[in-house]
Image: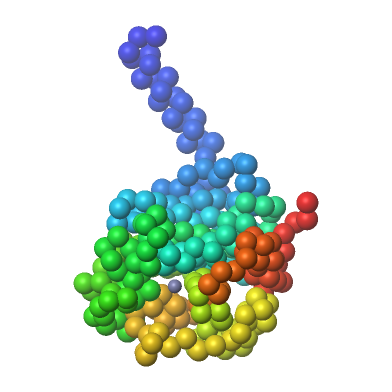
């Protein structure tokens, strides 16, 4: 084939690809990739942004459209590695019914790669949100200003776009569900289903610039912190907890 022929053939293939794109699926918008067919639970996958060091932050769309919209976030602190197994297990097994679910298993991929609480700028992402932000140092380094970190801005864009009714942010090791939220009845429901005590997490004083505070202030939905213990078993993370999380909304996996 001559050069012009190659160009025409390439153009034709590109157009054919565009025509067959799944236009009805909102999950494919904004720099998304195709849904891997080997994961039957996955409706779509979206890169919601990149970390300081250029790693992708990925959100997976699962469940059933038109049902209660839920976002689950793990590994906001890179050294709290256990709870992402819950989200990965939900993503990697059979299809889910009864909830319109997004999971972000590795929100802080640089921290996860280096085993650090903070991102690659040394910022605690859970102190960098633009609600009650303060200039904090040390373990709670809050960044140069509210929303200074690309990971923070990526999650803000994503949550603004998806507008979930419920958000759970998974951490370790305080072993409990945060009662200090705008719907305490929901916190008690989560506590019962996850078999974790309802507690008040004080951030060692007042909380500043946390993701849940920002979300609760900014949106109608409710965001809640869930803390597992230091060493939850793999069996809990991969087998029991995924079922318990779905049961909060009366959702379940299709058996098989
Ligand atoms: Zn944490």
Tell me if residue 208 comes above or below residue 59 in the rendering.
below
Percent position of residue 213, x then y: 42, 81
Percent position of residue 19, x then y: 51, 35
Image position of 207 (left or right of 178) = left
Residue 134 lies in what quarter of the image? bottom left
Judge whether residue 159 can be spotted in this image: yes
Judge whether residue 49 can be spotted in this image: no
Report the residue at 50% width, 73% height from top. Answer: 172
Residue 57 lies in what quarter of the image? bottom left
Report the residue at 55% width, 50% height from top. Answer: 44
Percent position of residue 64, x then y: 65, 59
Tell me if residue 12 comes above or below residue 21 in the rendering.
above
Report the residue at 45% width, 48% height from top. Answer: 32
Q: Residue furthest front?
A: 231
Pick whichever, 199 or 132, lies toward us. 199
Report the residue at 27% width, 76% height from top. Answer: 138
Where ligand 1 lies, by quadrant? Answer: bottom left
Percent position of residue 167, x then y: 52, 72
């Amino acid at each position: 084939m001559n050069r012009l022929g190659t160009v025409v053939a390439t153009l034709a293939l590109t157009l054919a690809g565009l025509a067959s794109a799944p236009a009805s699926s909102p999950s494919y918008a904004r720099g998304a990739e195709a849904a891997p067919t080997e994961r039957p639970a996955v409706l779509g996958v979206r890169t919601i942004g990149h970390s300081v060091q250029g790693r992708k932050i990925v959100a997976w769309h699962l469940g059933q459209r038109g049902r209660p919209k839920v976002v689950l976030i793990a590994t906001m602190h890179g050294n709290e590695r256990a709870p992402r197994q819950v989200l990965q297990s939900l993503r990697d097994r059979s299809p889910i019914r009864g909830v319109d679910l997004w999971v972000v298993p590795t929100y802080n991929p640089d921290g996860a790669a280096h085993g650090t609480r903070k991102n690659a700028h040394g910022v605690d992402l859970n102190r960098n949100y633009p609600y009650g932000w303060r200039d904090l140092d040390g373990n709670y380094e809050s960044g140069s200003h509210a929303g200074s970190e690309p990971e923070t801005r990526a999650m803000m864009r994503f949550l603004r776009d998806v507008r979930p009714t419920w958000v759970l942010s998974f951490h370790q090791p305080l072993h409990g569900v945060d009662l200090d939220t705008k719907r305490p009845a929901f916190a008690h429901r989560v506590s019962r289903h996850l078999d974790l005590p309802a507690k008040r997490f004080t951030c060692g004083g007042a909380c500043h610039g946390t993701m849940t505070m920002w979300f609760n202030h900014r949106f109608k939905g409710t965001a809640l912190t869930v803390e597992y213990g230091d060493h939850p078993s793999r069996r809990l993370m991969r087998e029991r907890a995924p079922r318990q999380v779905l049961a909060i909304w009366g959702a379940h996996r299709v058996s098989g």
